[in-house]
Image (cartoon, coloured by chain):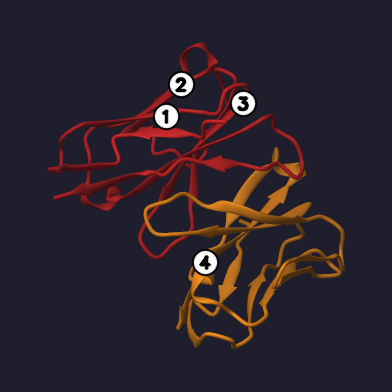
Chain colours: A orange, B red
Amino acid sequence: TQLLEQSPQFLSIQEGENLTVYCNSSSVFSSLQWYRQEPGEGPVLLVTVVTGGEVKKLKRLTFQFGDARKDSSLHITAAQPGDTGLYLCAGENATGGFKTIFGAGTRLFVKA
Amino acid sequence: EAGVAQSPRYKIIEKRQSVAFWCNPISGHATLYWYQQILGQGPKLLIQFQNNGVVDDSQLPKDRFSAERLKGVDSTLKIQPAKLEDSAVYLCASSLEIQVNNEQFFGPGTRLTVL
């Protein structure tokens, strides 16, 4: 069974601080996606990483896919209250019929 | 472009009752997913359709859950009878096709409370 473990589960920081959240697995994934979910809404895709070692930037967010394609990290620089939300990583395995497995998420709260 | 629509947004029922959820995916999206998201957890795939055919329903509790996607567009998910542990948000998502780097577009979900 493929599992994705996210850490930390919960993070509360002050505006302007930097943070990193992690997504780890013992399985290899064809691609890995990061979603952000706000209360009462469905997840919204932030980025997809495909190649081992790949780094993608989205404004103040930096995403990295591990060399072995088993783990990923999301780094936020100078966090803002608008970054508050649940960050979910999701791994996709083409050999499994493109089934997407979600982690439990990291709940981020940025205080003004 | 309209997003994925779901109804109702909230539903409260007593255990052993039946409930149905409806999803209208983004126009032209061939693939439709139903997920269950229990509080504090990530979404868990219940069933995946490609057009009106089932691609994966390995995690669907088939003794009480059923889903259909008639005509390959709208879909309904039914629970009969409901149990306390079915309390969760039920998310519907759609994507253009089944392929790698697949972007799924999610609806707002239906929050089910079973008393």
Tag 1 residue: B23
Does label 1 or label 3 sit earlier along the sequence? 1
Q: Chain of mark 1?
A: B
Label 3 secondary element: loop
- The residue lying at 39 percent from left, 43 percent from top is B109
The answer to which image quadrant residue A78 occupies is bottom right
Label 1 secondary element: strand
Is residue B13 or residue A79 the one in the foreground?
A79
Q: Are circles 1 and 2 on residues that touch, CB within 8 Å?
A: yes
Label 2 secondary element: loop
Type of residue at label 4? Gly
Tag 3 residue: B29
Residues beneath discs 4 and 3 located on the same chain = no
Label 4 secondary element: loop
Residues beneath discs 1 and 2 located on the same chain = yes
Q: Please, is residue B26 above or below residue A29 in the view? A: above
Residue A11 numbered tag: none
Q: Distance from label 1 to label 2 (Cα)? A: 6 Å
Q: Distance from label 3 to label 2 (Cα)? A: 11 Å
Q: Please, is residue B47 above or below residue A107 in the view? A: above
User: Residue extending furthest front?
Assistant: A112
**Which of the two discs, 4 and 1, sits closer to the camera?**
1
Residue B74 numbered tag: 2
- The residue lying at 57 percent from left, 23 percent from top is B27
Viewer can see residue A107: no
Q: Position of residue B84 (x, y in %)?
A: 21, 51
Q: Chain of mark 3?
A: B
Viewer can see residue A64: yes
